[in-house]
Image: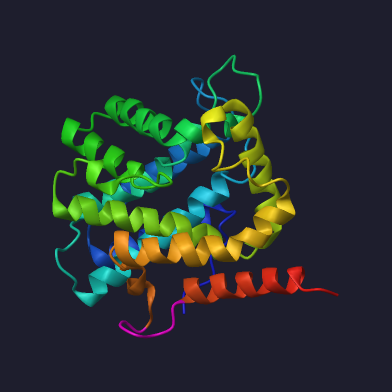
Amino acid sequence: MFPSVNTNDVGEVQREVVRLFQEMFPGEDPHLIECAFEHLATCFSGGNPKYQRIDVHYHDLEHTLQGTLCLARLLHGRHRAGAQPPVDLALFRLGILAVLLHDTGYLKRPGDHEGTGAKYTAVHVTRSAEFAAECLGMKNFTGPEIRAVQNMIRCTGVGVDLNSICFQSQAERLVGYALATADLLGQMAAEDYVDKLPVLYDEFREAAAYSPELHGDFTHFTNADELRRNTPRFWSHYVRPRLEHEFGGLYHFLEDPYPGGPNWYLERIEANLARIEKLLAPA
């Protein structure tokens, strides 16, 4: 249904997002989006003197690229379906900037050598919004544009009260919800999602050690196997209802054909959950 894209390759994801962008907005210049990908890759690889190289192994560059690709596909599908209100050129660009920046809060500043960026799990959304303001301010983005990107990033917070976010328009809210949808679907549909759950557990464990207030959110998992056992429930009791109700069912725009066709992301997630069930089954 979707062309195969290697989400470990920044260039491949960038080219696919630009292709979708040009289908939605023929004749428009993709330079800003291309530069955003290059800037993100530079930051995550340690090329920004204000930040160290990313040192977490779950919320890494590929995680961001998975969400970015999913967001572009979702907005493209919605555009093709003619849904209202439309997402215009400016908001599409801001949405791509937001998803590319949404986990920059895991980056550590120079001189911060204790632990990994996982210690910032509890505050990474706020730190990501601050990173976005600093980055976009240097690129002469306007105040409303920066606030839009920050609002979209805030939608990705676990358990965030969406009504507390002061969106500047209904279309901005929609792109924020689409970003949060893509953040969840992109990672859970990944081919190696099940294999990387122990890596996610390590991040949770470090987060809990540095943030005692997270007790009950992370520390109740005593090991990676317990996290794996709870993943199907996480999908059925948290992610799926949130996608459907709080985020407005935007994931349906990934159906091909729309409406009612197969949804590649849901199929991949169901395959991952079936693999977990098989791993947990008695011998």
212 above or below 25?
above
Front-most of 250 and 62?
250
Rendered residue at 36%/44% (across/down)? 160
Q: Name the quadrant of the C terminus.
A: bottom right
Front-most of 238 and 148?
238
Residue 116, horizontal then vertical, whole percent: 63, 29
Front-most of 83 and 141?
83
Q: Main secondary structure of the magenta part?
A: loop
Q: Which residues are magenta?
A: 257-263
Front-most of 161 and 193?
161
Rendered residue at 18%/57% (across/down)? 88
How many labels sit on residues? 0
39 above or below 191?
above
Rendered residue at 47%/63% (across/down)? 237
Answer whether residue 29 is visible to the viewer in this image. no
Quick check: is 124 in the magenta stretch?
no
Rendered residue at 44%/54% (across/down)? 183
**Seen in the image, is 252 located left or right of residue 83?**
right
Coloring applied to the structure:
rainbow
Residue 241: quadrant of the picture: bottom left
Residue 136, horizontal then vertical, whole percent: 30, 31
Residue 234, horizontal then vertical, whole percent: 53, 60
Answer whether residue 260 is visible to the viewer in this image. yes
